[in-house]
Image (spheres, grey):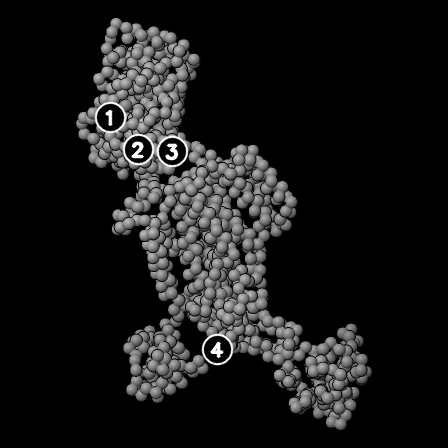
Amino acid sequence: MFEKILSRSQLYLAFFGPRKPEPGTIFLRQNRVYILPTRPGLAFALALGVMLIGSINYNLSLGYILTFLLASMGLVAILHTFRNLVHLHISPGRAEPVFAGKTAWFELFVENRSGYERSAIVLWREGKATQCDLAAARGATGSVPVAAERRGWLTPGRITLETRFPVGLLRAWSYIQPDMRCLVYPKPDDGMLPLPEPSGGVGEKRVASGGSDDFAGLRQYQVSDSPRHIHWKAAARGQGLQTKVFSGRAAAELWLDWSALPAHLDLESKLSRLTRWVLAADQEGLRYGLRLPGVELAPDAGEPQRLACLRELALYGL
Amino acid sequence: MDSRTAANATIQLRHLFWLLGGLALVAAPHTARLPWWLNLIATILFAWRIYLAWGERALPRTWLLTLLVVGGMVGVYLTYRTLFGRDSGVALLVLFLSLKLLELRHTRDALVLVLLTYFLALTNFFYSQTLPTAGLMLATTLVNTASLVNFAAPGRALQANLKTAGVLLAQAAPVMLILFFLFPRVQGPLWGLPQDAYSGITGLSNSMSPGAISRLSQSDAIAFRVRFQGAPPPRPQLYWRGPVFWNFDGRTWRPGDARPYGQIRFEASGKPYDYEVTLEPHNHNWLFALELAAKVPPNAGVSADYVLLSRTPVRNRMRYELRSYTNFTEGGANDADELRPGLQLPAGFNPRARRLAQQWAAGGASDVAIVQKALNYFREQGFVYTLEPPLLGRDSVDEFLFGSKRGFCEHYASSFVFLMRAAGLPARVVTGYQGGEINPVDQYMVVRQSDAHAWAEVWLKGRGWTRFDPTAAVSPVRVESGVAAAVPATDPLPLMARTTLAWLREVRYNWDALANKWNQLVLGYNPERQREFLSRMGMSEPGWENMALTLFWGVGGLLALLTAWLLRRMRSADPVQRLWLRFCAKLGKEGCARAAHEGPADFVARSAGRYPASAERIRAIGERYIALRYGVAADARLLAELRLLVREFGV
């Protein structure tokens, strides 16, 4: 609750505001772990005050003992809460690329090199949190979700590590900004426009892409497919219409070309369109190339080609 | 899980049951004191909550709870006729706690409930601060603290959480002791206490009617404890003086007019007894003292009839030191005005007793002879000393003296004083305690309510007020060995007063001694005792500033020690890694810090090149570290070598 009031002040930003990301393993030194009572903690203090006044008023020796025992417990809990968080090692883990509009997950490896267990360590950012428990001299992986809004490199920004263990009356927290990033691909647009025709100059017509060189597999039937390539035996077994796909030199080379897009589209829309095409072409098992102003990826098929194209699209112009 | 809404997290069943268990433990001692309907409601709400939780059913609507709150408050008001007393406050707290159960949805509600439960634990001390209560409440504190841990770490096992709570409380205990002894004590109350704050205390009252003392005699409760310096007086001299009664209305004896505080004037003979009395609270002003006290304790005065009176009613256990003489001659009060109330008798009551007394007085018999005649009458007319005397009518003295002839000490004292007054001798009734039992365990003399007694004082010319105990004339055993031996075996006495089971007495002696220690050390720790204790501990001026300062440093020092102890375990758990980091730190101090990306082999090579003089040792350390860290088997000898090398390393 303190944080809520403080977060609006300039002073707070000066202290806790964004800093440069820290490379490598982050060690939570004593001086970067903060601790304050939680709302129940303040209520606890208030209750102790009332109990003390009651004990004085009624001369209750045992009342004093109970009040002081609980107060001391609160003091000792400060140490325990602090100790539960301090001296942790946090190393950046993987961050799988995502499409814009989805959630990126930043993996963090939290390591407890000390000789006692750490419980209920919460990693959170922007209201989304994950919790982990760490046994003595063990580590655990926590993933912090971050909304990927725009294409390009996404950094997790400031992540809060906090704990209320052991009594929930106090909250120790620390801010980390691990040096890690996640690639965000442009969001594929939801237009209905099909893939462009394979460019005639370089390869054959697309209809000929079903040339009969090498059988490469089956895919869902599409309206434009030649009836000759439909897998009729499967259809007869009631498995629906499927088209046989063939690959080989004869397969058409498809160019996904920036310059071929309508001029009225803006940059992001063009990239979105190209992204969808890359995905569609990859799904159809086509050989395709990507042409952006100043960038050209030669036609190829398969996973590496898809990733390379998406990466170019994600980082184009940034 | 969303951490912003961590306070809204739902509660696990096991944690809910744990919380309910803790609450039940705290509330259990209260059930005997609460009205039956509240116990019933609380039990139903409790069972209802368990039923709802078990079946994962929805909690009741708010309007129902509101209705129950209002109904409960009306009920409490009707029972106690107030909402702000001590008892009604406890009743309301129990009511709200049990209703809060039906609002218990999230962790936030549970935390509120735990705090209220801590508070309810404190209210138990209004009624009892004995060792068993203390033990029970300590146990509940552990259980409730474990509840806090449960809600802070929902993923852990209950057992682990209980252990964590135990560790927290164990580490808190030394800090608590410092706070307890050094927190500057204030003599309460800070403001007026509710009317019912001290109800339910047994003891002598400020009037005496037939049956009053025999009722009290059936209580085993301790009235006060005495520690004598040196040997205690023999039992027949143990008359503990309490309230003195002058006014008789035919049935009930009451104190005289409010008398100014006086001085004790008497001629003492024999040796004095020095002793310390620890008086249990009885909610009246009088302090009990062995007849006759030679000095008045601080914060007390003495009335003209030699009753020690505290300035405030004794509402907490109180300790005072006294010196008394058991052989004395009272010399004061020769004033006829002062003696007149000692001759007052209600008109038209007890004509036969009056006639008998006037018979004795006729013929110019001396005062002493009259007294002797009365005592002989009691001794020779077949009187019976019993706890169960028959009920008496309007002329109670006549009926007792000439009819039933069965009575307890108040009957004897009352009729004796009546006879004396009728014979023209000023007389008064004194109540108090007679006797006392030395506890062989701690040598404290324990005086119980069952030792309550009433006797008489007659004013004799030249000797002043003189004690006569008509009960002793009837039943010398009462004074010699106590009430249990004196009354018929069928009379209802407290079990322990009569028990012949030696081991049971032994247990009770030990328990009493322990309870006494507890009272003296813990419960009796008040502002005076605190000053006394701190002076003894060497604090030159135990004012609150000094206490606060010592308190601050004491608590701070303890917490610093605890921090050091906790940090000790904060070091890396891996000794090899620790030694390596120490080695790196040593080199880092020299200006050759290991870069974050640098592996051990690279770092060793680089630093060996930089410090050719130490290169040999640097390589030795590096080799051992790499072998221990990445080698196949851990080797104790290698580790010892590494430890030695690192410890003695320097460039």
Residue depth check, mark 1 versus mark 3: number of the one nearer the observer: 1
Q: Is residue A276 visible?
A: no
Image location (x, y in percent) of residue B602: 40, 85
The amino acid beneath tag 2 is Val
Q: Nearer the viewer, residue B424 or B30?
A: B424
Q: CA distance from mark 2 to mark 4?
A: 74 Å
Write down the residue under mark 2.
Answer: B446
Q: Nearer the viewer, residue B437 or B78?
A: B78
Residue depth check, mark 2 versus mark 1: number of the one nearer the observer: 1
Label 2: which secondary element: strand
The amino acid beneath tag 3 is Pro
Q: Does label 3 lie on the same chain as label 1?
A: yes
Q: Residue furthest bottom?
A: A201
Write down the residue under mark 4.
Answer: A24
Label 4: which secondary element: loop
Write down the residue under mark 3.
Answer: B313
Residue in the image at 45% along x and 50% along y: A48
Q: Chain of mark 3?
A: B
Write down the residue under mark 1.
Answer: B265
Corner quadrant of residue A292: bottom right
The amino acid beneath tag 1 is Arg
Q: CA distance from mark 4 to mark 3?
A: 72 Å
Q: CA distance from mark 1 to mark 3?
A: 25 Å
Corner quadrant of residue A61: top left
Q: Is residue B617 visible?
A: yes
Residue in the image at 39% along x and 84% along y: B603
Name above or below for residue A143 compared with residue B320: below
